[in-house]
Image (spheres, rainbow, N blue to C red):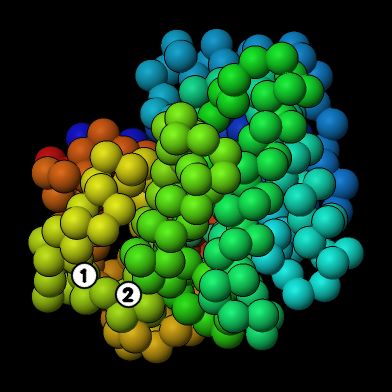
Amino acid sequence: MIFIGNHVSVSKGYLTMGKHEQKLGGDTFAFFPRNPRGGKSKSVSAEDIAALRCFLEENSFGKLVVHGAYTMNICAAKEDIRANSREMLHDDLLKLQALPGNYYNFHPGCHVGQGIETGIEQIAETLAQVIYEVEHASGMPLQNKILLETMAGKGSEVGSTFEELKAILDLTASLGGEEIRGKLGICMDTCHIWDAGYDIVSGLDDVLARFDEIIGLENLCAIHLNDSKNVLGSHKDRHEQLGKGLIGADALKAVVRHPLLQNLPFILETPNDDNGYIEEIQTVREWMK
Ligand code: FE
Ligand code: FE
Ligand code: ZN
């Protein structure tokens, strides 16, 4: 089995997110701790976080996959955007120390003409630095694994190949110490890897074998389950509802049922309203059988 859910809004608080997801039929979810387009982080009470933790445990939810803001770019060419992004990452992770045992996923970033190498260096430096700072500020080890998301390779995005993601993990470990590896992982987005050129329609086993060879499947922690509006290798990043895009229902079903992907949280990021998510969650539950 897998855990399945979608993105929910944080606007009515943390416990409300859990209850809402349960109504949709899910048993994991994603949320943006701040407006996905950036802006201030929503303040949250310790009671509300504690209530959500109880709720998740009582209802046997899988790990949550919190999502960093889209505007966060820790390898931006402009110093002020980098600094601001680093602060967002720091604030999000510090806040999530109170919601342990989950995942914090983010887009590695866009190098904006600086080149992939520089992008990778800036991402790794910031990750090592921010983890150190958050652990010191909170007086405890990092409580949630940080996941790098596989990207479609749109524009100057870093992280659209397994090699680039591996390079970020390795450099972060060489800067921050080997034990930092256990604090990092990967979230695989099916739309993104398809758009990046990994053929999960006719070669899912090969793609996973390649992932294992380069990064190691033990580092694959979560899946974003999306269809794609575009063809293999298009580098576009336009999500589609399950079965309505160019990946298609059969291939997505094979992802859901793949023996190497069991027990992971799967997050839908498909264009849907609540009723659409209820239907897609039911579909995925059918596929699991
Ligand atoms: Fe994402
Ligand atoms: Fe995604
Ligand atoms: Zn996307």
Residue 81 at x, y percent in the picture: 83, 65
Does residue 121 appear anywhere in the picture? yes
**Residue 275 relative to residue 200: left or right:** right
Pick the quarter of the image with the N terminus: top left
Pick the quarter of the image with the C terminus: top left
Residue depicted at 83% across the width and 56% down the height:
83
Q: Residues within 10 Å of mark 2 (few under 14, many from 20)?
A: many
Residue depicted at 27% across the width and 40% down the height:
218
Does residue 11 appear anywhere in the picture? no
Residue type beneath disc 1: Ile
Residue 176 at x, y percent in the picture: 57, 39
**Marks 2/1: CA distance?**
7 Å
The circle on residue 200 is 1
Q: Is residue 23 above or below residue 153?
A: above
**285 vs 205, nearest the viewer:** 205
Which residue carries the number 2 mark? 194
Residue type beneath disc 2: Trp
**Tag 2 secondary structure:** helix
**Residue 186 relative to residue 69: left or right:** left
Q: Is residue 17 above or below residue 36?
A: above
**Residue 254 relative to residue 285: left or right:** left
Residue depicted at 81% across the width and 46% down the height:
87
Q: Residues within 10 Å of mark 1 (few under 14, many from 20)?
A: many
